[in-house]
Image (cartoon, rainbow, N blue to C red):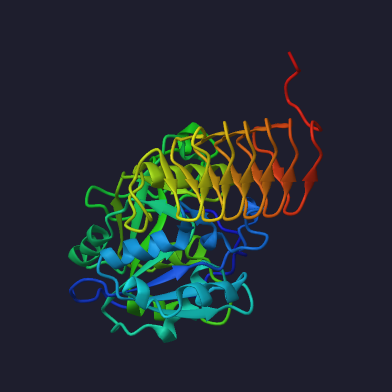
Amino acid sequence: MRAHPDQATALQTTAYPATAPVTTGAKEAVLLVGGKGTRLRPLTVHTPKPMVPAAGVPFLTHQLARARAAGIEHIVLATSYLAEVFAPHFGDGSALGLHLEYVTETDPLGTGGAIRNVAHRLHSAPGDPVLVFNGDILTGLDIRALVDTHQRARADVSLHLTKVPDPRAFGLVPTDADGRVTAFLEKPQTPEEIVTDQVNAGAYVFTRSVIDAIPAGRPVSVERETFPDLLAAGAHLQGMVDSTYWLDLGTPQAFVRGSADLVLGRAPSPAVPGRCGERLVLPGADVAEDAKLSGGTSVAAGAVIGSGARVDGSAILAGAWIEPDAVVRNSLVGAGARVGSRTVLDGVVVGDGAHVGADNELLGGVRVWCGARIEPAAIRFSSDG
């Protein structure tokens, strides 16, 4: 099970519906975008995690576009943190060919509580499939295949599962020979407890009536309460292993990698605003002729890349300034931030409006907070030689 900071609550005995009849396709979805994104700070100080730009557009744009390509028409966004940001940007969704609605939590409700909290905005009949997905996962999941699997199996809930090399950081989801989920196991502590390499990948298809049966008005975690409770009640939970591209964007390093993979075309999205390749330079950016951009680097409108600068595998956000001969690798430079001449960044996040002076060297996970100022030649990780 995916880890979320939801408070575990006592299981409530619920009469879950019998297996629903097969319908055709899924037309609506719930997108969970309420998290505070604390692991991503300072990226999320002023911006909710799904709105941080990846490959030139807010990450949420990629998720919405992929859902639309899979036949989804109506999406309800479950918002909370900085909820006021979403609607002004996406409006009613018509620009993406979607009908978008927004429901804001006033108190944290957890993943299951958030799903239940938006149920009144869904139009599906009790037996219809509803796609539910998390707002922090970049994936090449075949959404139609997950819905088809759900309907063929006549499942109550179907889960996208992915295989990971080291499952110790995840809850495990073993399945039988027919793909039916047999257990939800907490993070394994010993080799003997690693009974599968399958983990919850954060996308589900719920039969609508199951959503309506989630307890209302209190925090509920689907990972810790809803799914185990359903299994104990004899419901049919189906797993579909899809081992295409999958990345949890919960850390700055993962987010930078995800953006680069979108630009490179390793992670599929119809919303990348240009051709996939080594670089993506948006209209309005100013890149010096002798600057070198590579590795899936994206440069937003209003950004400036100075002469002789080298930028590899990085995201340079709107209005940022990379001065001449700076080197930026696997890093994100926030909106309006500035990186001085000859400064080296490698695996670094520079928050919005921050200023890193010339001749600094920042490496290995350093986070420069929004608006901070680092004087020239103030920090080095290696000696001058």
Which of 149 and 136 lies nearest the eye of the viewer? 136
Measuring 58% from the left and 35% from the top, which residue is drawn there?
A: 307
Looking at the image, which residue sits at the far front? 289
- What is the quadrant of residue 131 in the picture? bottom left
Percent position of residue 169, x then y = 53, 42
Query: Where does the image place residue 210, in percent across and percent down from the top left?
Result: 37, 75
* Residue ranking furthest to the top: 385
Along the viewing direction, whichever of 190 and 222 lies nearer the viewer: 222
Q: How many marks?
A: 0
Can you say whether 243 is above or below 220 in the image? above
Determine the image quadrant of residue 325: top right
- Image-based side of 158 in relation to 200, left or right: left
User: Is residue 8 in sight in this rendering?
Assistant: yes
Q: Position of residue 269 (x, y in %)?
A: 34, 54
Q: Please name whichever residue, 247 or 351, is drawn nearer the observer in this view of the structure.
A: 351
Please state if 91 lies on the left or on the right of 40 as rendered: left
Q: Is residue 24 above or below residue 236?
A: below
Image point 62% across, 65% down: which residue? 7
Q: Position of residue 236 (x, y in %)?
A: 30, 65
Q: Quadrant of the C terminus?
A: top right
**Residue 83 or residue 325, whichever sits in front:** 325
Q: Residue at x 42, y 63 (%)?
A: 61
Residue 198 appears anywhere in the view: no
